Amino acid sequence: MARRSEHSQQEIRDMVLNAAQNIVIEEGFAGLTVRKIAMSIDYTVGSIYMVFENMADLVMHINAKTLDDIELALQIEQNGGPAQAIEQMAQAYLEFANTHYNRWQMIFEYRLPPGSSLPEWYSEKIDKVFSPIEHLISQLAPERSAEDCKRAARALWAGVHGICVLSLNGSLDRAGVNNVIASVEILVTGFLRGWVSRG
């Protein structure tokens, strides 16, 4: 039987998040249940719902930790100009997805309940991931508006993400593409060249 709480709510919250993240790492999103989390930390299911509103709230906070780690992974030492830095960031993203596949995948696998929208604090996490990419893109075409740079950064990253997905599920090989890094370089270079020429 789960023991009586000996920790503060913040400590229980941290324990729940760490346990949940470990389950995702080992079993993927499909293996994540509140009961399994409760058993792993020797607390009741009710204790978890004292610190998280519901499963959706818990999943959003797990994914937020992954977004924080992606943001850190993209904070690379830049060698060269903005275009080269964006290529390096894209490669860092691919490496993160490959190394932390289950956590990375859960960000895109999870769907909010119908009628729900992303919390503002979560949207801010997403913005922090894209902010340095937007900044670099703006350096390539300083006459473009901030909104244009935002759209361009997210469009480019949708392509990088797509290559990442195809690579990790083996679809690139079936298409006769066996060099993921080269594919990313072609995508980034071509996109940025078009972005600058449109200015």
Image (cartoon, rainbow, N blue to C red):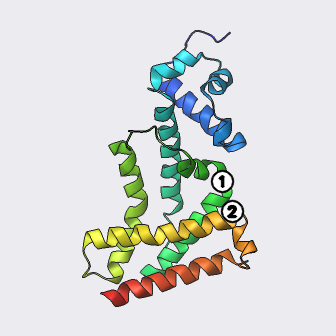
The quadrant holding residue 81 is bottom left
Is label 2 in a helix, a strand or a loop? helix
Residue 175 placed where, x, y %? 71, 76
Q: Could you tell me the amino acid type at mark 1?
A: Tyr
| Total numbered circles | 2
Task: State whether residue 79 appears in this view.
Answer: no
Cα separation, mark 2 vs mark 1, equals 9 Å
Of residues 49 and 171, the one drawn nearer to the viewer in this rendering: 171
Q: Quadrant of the C terminus?
A: bottom left
* Mark with earlier residue (2, 1): 1
The reply to whether dot 2 and dot 1 touch (C-beta < 8 Å) is yes
Q: Position of residue 4 (x, y in %)?
A: 58, 9
Q: Residue at x 26, y 79 (%)?
A: 144
Q: Is residue 72 visible?
A: yes
Q: Residue at x 31, y 83 (%)?
A: 141
Please tell me which residue is depicted at 56% across the width and 64% down the height of the picture.
93
Task: Compare residues 191 and 51 and report the one nearer the observer.
Answer: 191
What amino acid is labelled 2 in the image?
Answer: Leu
Identify the residue under disc 1: 101
* Relative to 27, 146 lies left or right: left
Closer to the eye: label 2 or 1: 2
- What is the x, y in percent for residue 171? 70, 68
Q: Is residue 79 above or below residue 41?
A: below
Element under disc 1: helix
Asked if residue 123 is positioned above or below residue 31 in the image, the reply reads below
Report the disc number at residue 168.
Answer: 2
Considering the image in quadrants, where does the N terminus appear?
top right
How packed is label 2: few (under 14 Cα within 10 Å), some, or many (20 or more)?
some
Residue located farthest toward the front when viewing the structure as drawn? 114
